[in-house]
Amino acid sequence: MASDRIFGLVMAVVALAYIASAFQIQVSFLSDPVGPKTFPIIIGIVAALSSMFLVFRPDPEPEWPAAKTFGALAVAVTVLVLYAYSLRPLGFLLPTAIAAAVLSYQIAPRPRYAAIAGICLSGGLFLIFKYALGLGLVPFPAGLSG
Amino acid sequence: MDILTNLSLGFSIALSPYTLMLAVVGCFLGTIIGALPGLGPSNGVAILIPLTFTLGLDATSALVLMTAVYYGAMYGGRISSILLNIPGDEPALFTTLDGYPMAKAGRAGDALVISGVASFVGALLATIGLMLLAPMLARVAYLFGPSEYFALYLLAFCTLGGMASNNQAKAAIASCIGLGIAMIGVDNTSGMPRLTGGNLHLYDGVDFLVAIVGLFAVAEVFFFIESHGKESSIGVKLEKVSVPWKEIILTRWVMLRASAVGFIAGILPGAGASLGSFLAYMTEKSIAGEKGGFGTGVAKGIAAPEAGNNAAAGGALVPMLTLGVPGSGTTAVLLALLMTLNITPGPTLFTDRPEVVWGLIASLLIANFVLLLMNVPMVKIFVRVLQVPPAILLPGVTMISFIGIYSLSGSYFDLLLMIVFGILGYVLRKLDIPTVPVILGILLGGNMEDALRRAMVISDGDGWYLFSSPIAIGLWVAAVLGFIAPMFLRGFLKKPQRVTD
């Protein structure tokens, strides 16, 4: 109940913001009868209406995980974001090993196993991508490989 | 005898050693992808697309490889359904209903062989159907103008939303999210940036590959973290594999009927393989009646959904190739592949690039035989694949997704966007909101708007032009029916629940 209502409200607000920004789209002097604004505005209206429907007629509550699991999910997201930022400066091997190990640990909490899985995945994937598929991956931080 | 000339052209391409090798590799990868729980046809194909693109395969090769993966995944989905009681993908759900009970009764090998043969019959008949029907439909598609295309896109969203979701409002929201994202970027007609929020990264729009990999592959990792991979331990043992000829012959009519039902369901835009296996199973269940023993592990209950599922997978290629409107989630991903390769699906594809279409069809015919070999005598290899623990598999899939997207664009912005889509996919699935309409919206949003705008240019802004031809009116009626009818049919067509231990 509550989840659907909250989601419906959030989506309704997003849809209104979307419609508002669609009205701001600049129209060039050479335009067709429909113009660049109309379709986004229609989408926004349909989205807002169906969101309101969800607020008034919500489905039964889904099973949300416990707070601890949300912690694990937050850790996973943080690790993935850091991974995205570190791929270029730190090279492939080190960030991949760490990110894979952390994800593995979040799925099955066995530290040693996760560490080995991370290292093997990082090394194995590097070999496959670099030599079998020929992608131009940089293995080490830019400073080290000179 | 047009078809024979075209087929010989197709086979001349498909039988070249390189293409043949790609088809075999695709079948192998596909069966593994289908068999692994947590890696279905949609996300399997999705994470492979960036890789084929960076490998620099030409259009025909890439398409042959990926459709072989697609067919393979449809075969492979049954392995985890039968052995683990976990559908490898949504359409394989109905295979668990009889497959798992049969496996628990000590006949896992028989169940795998029967379902393998059923998959073969369904897929082969559907490929032949595709071969006969697609050129005809392509000719009809020439009659389609912008107003018909607009109605057709609408139909795809409506049927997909109506069939795939339990709540129409949620399906509509999902479609709007996708369409809304498709609008971001520079407007094709006027050249003005739209809805970018001033962010330069968004001027090119949101790459649909980023969205697909995020929604399908990254979201899956979050689900496995939630469940700690508990669900996936092998439930039953596979001892020896022999061919139960008697039961295969006994189920021949079931397979044929189920293939026909599945193929038709697959052709409907947006309906897809789940509907195919569902209808096939329910039809056979009502034909067999109470005495049929459906749900207790009978051969017919395994043959029907598998033939239906694979026939629908072939059928779903028909609207995708001829009209550019995918019939299922995975064909939506294949459409993304075509767009990445700069191939415009539609009637012109059949006249301008016959080598692509017929090479593909011939490869699919060959792939079916390869898959039958892999999935019946060699099935034990794939059963071993199921023993890869999720704690290695899922991090591996995530890393492959990251490398794939990173090698496409080399920008961390796309990686961040992919993570955002992963979170979105997790939340949507938790709330029982289908994610396939989001993908479809991102893929088709631009075309749908173009169709509307071109229609309005032709008619000088007269809205009635959208309903000006019989085809357009028919599509509008079908769209409205496809969206509304499931609300009333829901009482009848209750999905059978999964077998619980």
Image (tube, rainbow, N blue to C red):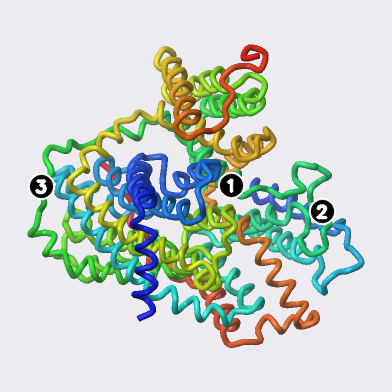
| Mark 2–mark 3 CB contact (< 8 Å) | no
Picture layout, residue B240 above or below residue B143: above
Q: Which mark is residue B15?
A: none
Residue B324 relative to residue B467: left or right: left
Q: State which quarter of the image contains the C terminus of chain A.
A: top right
Q: Label 2 vs label 3: CA separation?
A: 62 Å
Q: Earlier in the sequence, mark 2 or mark 1?
A: 2
Residue B444 appears in the figure: yes
- The residue identified by callout 1 is B209
Residue B352 relative to residue B195: left or right: left
Hey, which quadrant is residue B240 in on the image?
top left
Picture layout, residue B300 above or below residue A99: below
Picture layout, residue B108 above or below residue B8: above
Badge 3 marks a residue whose secondary structure is: loop
**Labels 3, 1: one chain:** yes
| Mark 2–mark 1 CB contact (< 8 Å) | no
Q: Label 2 vs label 1: CA separation?
A: 21 Å
Q: Earlier in the sequence, mark 2 or mark 3?
A: 2
Q: Amino acid at mark 3?
A: Ser
